[in-house]
Image (cartoon, grey):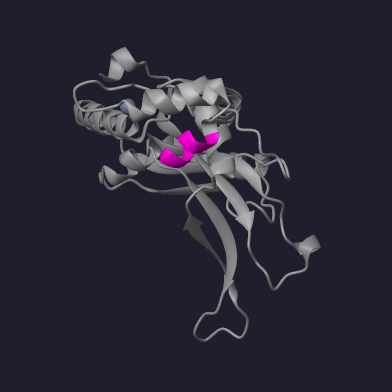
Amino acid sequence: MKRLRKHAAGDPELLRIATALSRCNRRHRCLHPACPQCGRALQRLLVRIIARFLKAHANLGPWRVLSVILPVRPGGTEIEFAEAWDRYAALLRQAGLTRGVFGLDFSFNEDDRRALADADRFEPHACVHLYGLAPAAEVKAAVPQLKQLLPTTDAVRRPVRSTPFDGDLAAVAYSFKPDFVRRQTILKDKVGRANPVRNTRDRPLTVEQQIPLVQALEGAGLNGRIMLLGLSMEAIA
Ligand SMILES: [Zn+2]
């Protein structure tokens, strides 16, 4: 945040955000969508609410973890949570999902496979990613359709992933994680393999990436990353 403040000099909009975030403390929460402390508090609250909801409505389960990534625009660096929200909601409904508790995550993806020619590496891009829980039967029926709608690309190798939900609330916490990274695709040597294999590593966002993210989070609002499909906050709380 100190870095953000330094870069905010001369930009009244950024300066206002940086000042609000710097004043956040336990006695007076700023409730800014880009505030890491408030983000963690919101995450804890959602985990508690959703844990209670899952327990009270066991009849809706079992649940599965579903992760979906929409096609990225090569070189696209604009971050649009509201637009992504609409596109993901439409996509999930199109695939037949009627219920779910999802969060929108963000990463800035870069291709750091230095052994490859420039033309073979994907362009850096902003990526808004959907992650959460939905009824297992619906997820199983939806996954083949989602895979058809979202073909694999070099930038997004696994646009659709689904795993069983064993009740571990870490999956719920991950849906609403308040920290965001720069995800680098790399080539890594692996024992027993002749050629290095594709892998990723996380790095902190650069200030140039943080500034548009903070602005996008502010535009989205504190609940802009929460997607309750077929459920209302009143119904789950
Ligand atoms: Zn705060």
Quarter occupied by residue 174: top left
Q: In this orientation, does residue 99 appear?
A: no
Q: Is residue 117 left or right of residue 115?
A: right
Residue at (50, 31) in percent of width and height: 214
Q: Is residue 17 left or right of residue 44?
A: right
Residue at (41, 39) in percent of width and height: 2
Furthest toward the right, the residue is: 119
**Residue 19 position within the rendered picture, expressed as x and y whole percent measured from the top left:** 40, 25
Residue at (25, 44) in percent of width and height: 167
- Magenta stretch encompasses residue 32: no
**Residue 52 position within the rendered picture, expressed as x and y whole percent measured from the top left:** 20, 28
- In the image, residue 118 sits, relative to residue 71, either above or below, namely below
- In the image, residue 236 sits, relative to residue 70, either above or below, namely above
Q: Quadrant of the C terminus?
A: top left
Q: Is residue 42 left or right of residue 14?
A: left
The quarter of the picture showing ligand 1? top left
Q: Which residues are magenta?
A: 2-7
**Residue 13 position within the rendered picture, expressed as x and y whole percent measured from the top left:** 54, 21
- In the image, residue 71 sits, relative to residue 218, either above or below, namely below
